[in-house]
Image: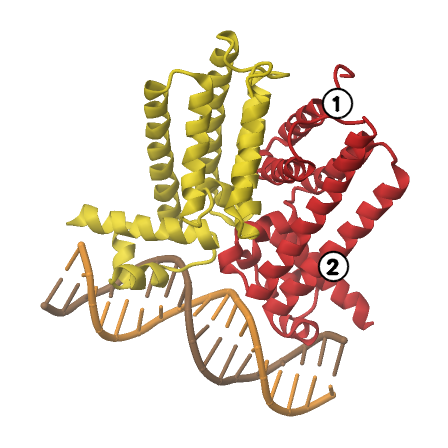
Chain colours: A yellow, B red, C brown, D orange
Amino acid sequence: MTAITAERVLDSAQRLVQTRGFNGFSYRDIAEEIGIKSASIHYYFPSKSDLGVALVQRYRERFDAELQSITTRDQEASKRLKAFVGLFRQTLNDERLCLCGMLGAEKDGLPPAVSQQVCDFFVLCENWLTNVLKRGRKDGEVAFLGSPQTVADQFLSLLEGAMVVARSLNDPGRFDKTTNAFLRVLKPSDEA
Amino acid sequence: MTAITAERVLDSAQRLVQTRGFNGFSYRDIAEEIGIKSASIHYYFPSKSDLGVALVQRYRERFDAELQSITTRDQEASKRLKAFVGLFRQTLNDERLCLCGMLGAEKDGLPPAVSQQVCDFFVLCENWLTNVLKRGRKDGEVAFLGSPQTVADQFLSLLEGAMVVARSLNDPGRFDKTTNAFLRVLKPSDEA
DNA sequence: GTCTATAGGCAGATAGAC
DNA sequence: GTCTATCTGCCTATAGAC
């Protein structure tokens, strides 16, 4: 089946990007990992740029689906934010970085089509977070200084950075401490 | 002069790592940029791993010197923190990432000796920040929930992440909004 | 110290058999 | 769809002339 191989290529490539970066792996690495020849990969993704675009597209779509599922499942702002953190925490647990955190860093070494997609991912995150914060503040579920947009940007930046630092220091616990401290500050008055 | 060429190599290589990542440039890129042949670079840095180690070492030493200079110049915690942010902001202004933010992300695609050095950089930052926060809290210059260590980690993560996101979105202003918002929260009571 | 020349290998990519 | 075979070019790295 065509679809299955393509998915396996994407799975392998995604992990490689998340751990080594876009220029830190080759078609051969993927091929060996999934047991085919590198030429076969070109059948699905003619150029590495095509592969990169498909990678981020899938990642963003899946992430979007997760966000919608959170929005449906959790009504309280603090729960939604915690679930958002959970998405990143899960990735860190697999000893990976956020795909777009990695690619965003490598921007100038990427095919332009890929870096554009990365922007879209960040915008998606910030819009979702902004809406959660807006609504949460209106309902008195969270409290913060400044605009929801700024806090959303802050939150996203914190998560992306915390993954890099925690992974570099081989200490995932730092990610938890850091993100929990941020969530605590958002609590209205003295619920802590 | 041997020293001058070596420095020029490091300058060029540093910029390349900060914009494209460690695997996103070659000895030839450096050679063409500074007008020598790539073979000459091997005279100073036999392997790319050697180059990477020298790069982070110099970066860390310079950063350490800046931190000491800040400690001497600024006595108030808020000024020290603002100056710390300024170091990163300056890098972003050159359209670059923090060298160690980039290398920390690419960890698994790096020579092991390099990734070890990157850890040292993060530890240096966190120790300095922790001391500033400890002292600042004791003197009533800053206020925050949780331990100084956790807030230091948070701050560093925020800065590293904010650089990635701001650079990816081509909007350095985001970095300023995000970091200013964090500094504001650290102010005791209503000095804002 | 910097060069030319070159080794040896791997990269992304294509052609064409099956 | 996947393969073998191959192209072209770039990579890191070394040898040895100057």
Horizontal and vertical percent for residue A139?
Answer: 48, 8
Please count the marks in the image.
Answer: 2
* Residue beneath the point at 65% across and 41% down: B95
Residue B137's image quarter? Answer: top right
**In this view, B179 is above or below D7:** above
Is the residue under label 2 in contact with that under label 1 (CB below 8 Å)?
no
Q: Are marks 1 and 2 on the same chain?
A: yes
Side of D3 relative to A117 (left or right): left
Horizontal and vertical percent for residue B123?
Answer: 67, 50
* Most foreground residue, B68 or A33: B68
Horizontal and vertical percent for residue B117?
Answer: 64, 59
Image quadrant containing the C terminus of chain B: top right
Q: How crowded is mark 2: few (under 14 residues within 10 Å), some or many (20 or more)?
A: some
Can you see residue B168? no
Can you see residue B145? yes
* Residue beneath the point at 26% across and 47% down: A7
Judging by the rendered image, the residue that carries numbered circle 2 is B58
Q: How crowded is mark 1: few (under 14 residues within 10 Å), some or many (20 or more)?
A: some
Judging by the rendered image, the residue that carries numbered circle 1 is B187
Q: Looking at the image, which residue sits at the far right?
A: B73
| Letter of the chain that mark 2 sits on in the rendering | B
* Residue beneath the point at 40% across and 40% down: A90
Q: How far apart are marks 1 and 2 (CA)?
A: 34 Å
| Letter of the chain that mark 1 sits on in the rendering | B
> Hey, what amino acid is under mark 2?
Arg
* Most foreground residue, B25 or A19: A19
Residue B72's image quarter? Answer: top right
Q: Could you say whether the residue bearing mark 1 is in a helix, strand or loop? A: loop
Mark 1 vs mark 2: give the one in front.
1
> Hey, what amino acid is under mark 1?
Lys
